[in-house]
Image (cartoon, helix red, strand yellow):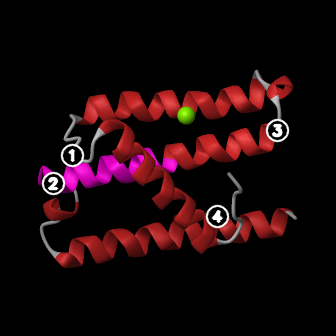
Amino acid sequence: MGFRSNQEGVLEDIRIERRRQDEKWGPDRELSDPHWLTILMEEVGEVAMTLLDEPEKGHPACLTNKELIQVAAVVVAWMESRAVQGEGAAAWVHDDDRVAFLAAYNKTFDAAMRVERKRK
Ligand SMILES: [Mg+2]
């Protein structure tokens, strides 16, 4: 699997991984939050393994990319599951809440990027 470096390419890789997950596990996985968290932490652990324990097993960067894509795809699947169960997107009381959350998130992200750029 070749990994892409631009945003659309990365998102496409995540979509491909989501389809693979659906084919492997079935498309309607309405699991509890603790169950999803367990799956996510297992995938995060696999990212750590590629960085810390397994450089001898091949292309570490490629393995790390694969595991990061799986982490992102699990988060997407979790959010889909929460939305289906009325706990995710559908749980926003007002669109204003969602907009305010996204604005705060973007402000934090932008500030973090400014700090990162100054460090370089
Ligand atoms: Mg994995």
In space, the residues marked 2 and 1 are separated at their CA atoms by 9 Å
Q: How many marks?
A: 4
Camera-nearest label, 2 or 1: 1
Q: Are marks 2 and 1 in contact (CB under 8 Å)?
A: yes
Q: Secondary structure at mark 4?
A: helix
10 Å crowding of disc 4: few (<14), some (14-19), many (20+): few
Label 2 CB sits under 8 Å from any ligand 1 atom: no
Q: Which of disc 3 and disc 1 is earlier in sequence?
A: 1
Residue at the spot of label 4: 112
- Given contact means CB atoms under 8 Å apart, are the residues at marks 4 and 2 in contact? no
Quadrant hosting ligand 1: top right
Left or right: 70 in relation to 87: right
Q: Determine the CA span between mark 1 and mark 4.
A: 36 Å
Image coordinates of residue 57 in percent, x first then y, are 80, 26
- Residue toward you, 42 or 99: 42
Q: Amino acid at mark 2?
A: Val
Q: State the residue position of label 1.
A: 28
Residue 108 drawn in magenta = no
For this orientation, the residue located farthest to the front is: 23
Q: Residue 59, which numbered label?
A: 3
Query: Which amino acid type corresponds to the residue marked 3 in the rendered image?
Result: His
Q: CA distance from mark 4 to mark 2?
A: 32 Å
Q: Is residue 11 left or right of residue 75?
A: right
Q: Main secondary structure of the magenta part?
A: helix
Residue at the location (38% across, 53% down)? Answer: 76
> Which region shows up in magenta?
72-87
Query: To which residue does mark 2 refer?
Result: 84
* Circle 1 SS class: loop
The residue drawn where x is 16% and y is 52% is 87
